Every structure is written in C-alpha cells, then in structure tokens.
Amino acid sequence: MEKNIDIKDFKKTVAKRNFYNTNDAGKVFLFALLLPFVVSLVFSFIGYAIARGVGIAFTEGESWIRTLYDNYLWFSIPYALISQISFICLFFTYNKVNRISLKAAKVKFKKINPVVAVISAVFGIIFVICLYGLIEGCFGTLFDMWGITTDPNPIPLNNFGWYVFYVIFFAAVPAICEELIFRGMIFNGLKRGIGSIWAIILSSLLFALIHQNINQFIYPFIMGCVFAILMNKTNNLIYPILMHFFNNLTTVTIQYLMNIGAINLNLTVGAVYVVVSLILALVVGVLFFLFYFFYLRKKDFADSATEGEEYVGKDPIFIGKLPLTMYAGIALSIIFIVINAVMG
C-alpha cells in the first residue's frame, strides 16, 4: 500500500532558503581567497609545461611565472581573468550545494528604479574623477616613496579593439562577479548576524583585502563602503553592479586616453595638487551624502521576498558573532599581502 505524501511537507523539505547568514559569509570569503590561488597555481604549471613544450627558455634565477605573464598574451589574459572566473563559479556552485536560491543575492531586474539606476551610474563615474588625484597621485606617490609599486598590466590598451576587450573583461565582468560575492553573498550574510553598519565596514574591509596589495587597499575599501551602503538601502544588487561597472569603465577609459596620448594626468604632486585632490574627495563625499539622506532615505525599497527555512546542520565554530572561517580568511589574506609586499 502506497504511503500518501503531504505536498506541503514535501515542498518545505526541499525548499531553498532565500538568504545568506554569517556562516555563509565566512565560508564564501575563504573560498573566494583560496579558489583563485589554487586555480592560478594549477594554470601556472600548465602554462609552464606548454612553454617548455614549445621551446620557450627561461633564464636561471628568474620567475618563470613573471616571464610568461609579462611576455605572452596566451598566458597573461587567462591568468588575469582567473579571479573573476573563480568568483562566478563559486557563486553558482555554493548556492547549488547549499540549496540556496539565487534570489538570496537580491538581483532584482523587475524592481529597478530608473532614477536610482542612472544616479548610481553617474556616481560610479564621479567617484573615479574626484578620487583619482587623491588615490593615484597623493597615495600613489607615498607608496612609491616607500618602495611599494604596482606591476604594470602586460595586456595592451593602445587601440579601440583592446579598449573594448578591457570594457568587457576588466569593467563589466568584475562588476558582476565581485558584486555577487561581496555585496550579494558576504554583505547580505553579515547583515543578518552583525547588523548593517558593521556589515558595511567588514564587507568593505574584506573587499579591500581580497586585492592582496597594500597599494590597492584604500580605494577598494572606500568604494566597498559606498557599494554596501547602496545595497543596504535599496535591497537590489543591480545598483551596486551599475555603480561598480561605470567606476571600472571610467578607470579603463582614462587609462586608454592616457595610453593613446589624448590626455595627460601625470602631474607633479605638490601642495596645490594635494589641496585640490582633497577638495574633490570632499565634494564627492558630500554629494553622495546628499543623495543618500535627501533621496534614498525617502524611497521605499522594502524587501518583501520570503526568506525560507534555515538549514539545521552541524553548528559552525564561532568566535563572538563571526565564524572561524572568517578569521581564517582574514589572517590568510594578510599573509598573502605581506608575501606580495616582500616579494615586490
């Protein structure tokens, strides 16, 4: 005799939850740190094997990874995209394995406010323009004095074809992949456990740490805070993605125009330069403050989606309000930063 199955109980059993928690945030950050490292290591050895197979010689004592990255596009292009490919694979795989609905990331195309979307895009542009002098000029000069430099990207950006390539793979793709991980998963997960303010600060810190360079810490942290504030208020990841994309697009466009000689922003950093840079930074901060307090706060972006059931499994190890995986990820990212700084 067949046993009758209660459809409601069946759906409740297999239903996916529509939210992330702090445990998810900790694991996702750790995976986001380790996965690109492992994949890049594997890819490097495969590239080395291919290089040796086609007769590429390496000078004794030189870094063969650096040699391949600086001189061969078949190696440098995939290598530069490893992080983004890892992030998007992590997003879908983690959600699938843990039975989390993609709705948990709060990507809501049907609820886009055109005005907020346009203003988000405009601010993505303005932040680069107003902070370029402070970050690239003032802090860049300071880091140069300390002997901390950024390795140049070997992928060319000297014609319109390469500009389109950069727009797609270094502006659009990172905006989508990084926002899905850091605001969609990590920020939303932290918000449930430690509240909005601390989630904004911590998720931005993690976003800065993932870049694994001291000289690529300040700007990602600032923009991470801006993206998280926007996400916290609107409950829609589309707006941070738009702001992030136009931020990247402006950076790529400025670099392209400099490379082809259309503009020259390599100005001497002096007292006037510093004062102007600080004023511009203050201006964009005030503008965003006005946008948030006199427009966003008056809009209703209430999230009405049902969250589903919390999965009850093995309890993770927590220290305070954060899982052990979060502390492990932070410690590991600091180690990577120190190693990168020491190795130059």
Image (spheres, rainbow, N blue to C red):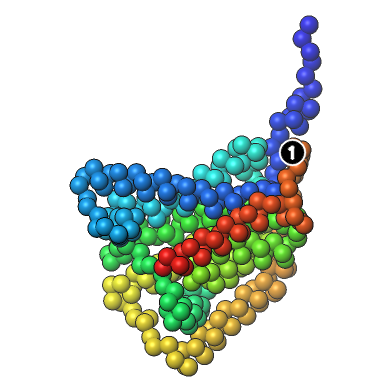
In the image, 332: left or right of 49?
Answer: right
Q: From this viewpoint, is residue 40 visible?
A: yes
Where in the figure is residue 221, as x and y percent of width and height?
58, 68
Where in the figure is residue 75, as x and y percent of width and height?
32, 51
Q: Is residue 263 above or below residue 268?
A: above
Residue highlighted by disc 1:
314
Q: Residue at x 34, y 44 (%)?
A: 46
In the image, what residue type sits under mark 1?
Answer: Lys
Where in the figure is residue 210, as x and y percent of width and height?
54, 60
Q: Nearer the viewer, residue 277 or 127?
A: 277
Q: Residue furthest front?
A: 60
* Quarter where residue 3 is shown: top right
Where in the figure is residue 266, as x and y percent of width and height?
36, 82
* Quarter where residue 223 is shown: bottom right
Q: Residue at x 51, y 64 (%)?
A: 337
Q: Nearer the viewer, residue 21 or 286?
A: 21
In the image, 166: left or right of 302?
Answer: left
Q: Is residue 44 above or below residue 135?
A: above
Q: Is residue 245 above or below residue 126?
A: above
Secondary structure, mark 1, is loop
Name the image quarter holding the C terminus: bottom left
Name the image quarter holding the N terminus: top right
